[in-house]
Image (cartoon, rainbow, N blue to C red):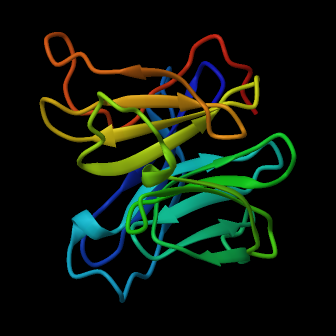
Amino acid sequence: IGLDKVLIALNQVPSPKLQLIDIATSKIELEHAFTDEMSSGAHGQLRRMRMTKDGTYLMAWLGRKVVEYDKDFKPLHTLTTGAWSVAPLHNGNVLIMDEGQSTCKEMNSQGAVVWSLKKTDINLPDVKLGGNTQTCERLASGNTVMLLHSSEGNAQAVEVTPDKQVVWALEDWKNLGPATSVQFLDEPGL
């Protein structure tokens, strides 16, 4: 958050926590524990989460839902989806990677899917797209990058246009491993 704070999710049984830490002072500025009756272990709890420009918290509960919480951690919106990641978009919608459906979904606050990209929508004749889809990122151009946690012989990332035409695919097992997430440093953030 800015240059001096970091937002961390601590997956732990019985209660995962969210912490906001000032990295210059190492002071925990905020800590909130969540109740999680659905998870059988720490692995199945929180995934990529964001603090929004409005000071709310957008959280992906692995394989279950996306919840936007207000500053007091009261739920504002809940979207039922097999979420692995979530990111706010400039238009007010959210971009969710539904790992269970291998689908990147743009959803509005009412829960309607306004755009989606299934892994099977991607047409790359000589490239394999195995493994799990874990995150997707929307670029300022309107294109979307899907990242795949896979194994050698499969692509790790694919960029597509809004009409699902492939721009590029990355397969580099010499220098990189499975792709779980990426940050595009030249993209404007929220």
**Residue occupying image coordinates x 36% and y 89%:** 37
Question: Quick one: 79 or 154, which is closer to the camera?
Answer: 154
Percent coordinates x, y for residue 174 in the rendering: 13, 11
Q: Residue 80 falls in which quadrant of the image?
A: bottom right
Percent coordinates x, y for residue 188 in the rendering: 74, 20
Q: In this picture, is 183 found above or below 62?
A: above
The residue at the far right in this view is 91
Q: Residue 76 falls in which quadrant of the image?
A: bottom right
**Residue occupying image coordinates x 22% and y 18%:** 176
For the C terminus, the image quarter is top right
Q: Residue 138 falls in which quadrant of the image?
A: top right
Question: Quick one: 53 or 63, which is closer to the camera?
Answer: 63
Question: Quick one: 160 or 15, which is closer to the camera?
Answer: 160
**Residue occupying image coordinates x 63% and y 40%:** 164
**Residue occupying image coordinates x 53% and y 74%:** 81
For the N terminus, the image quarter is top right
92 displayed left or right of 175: right
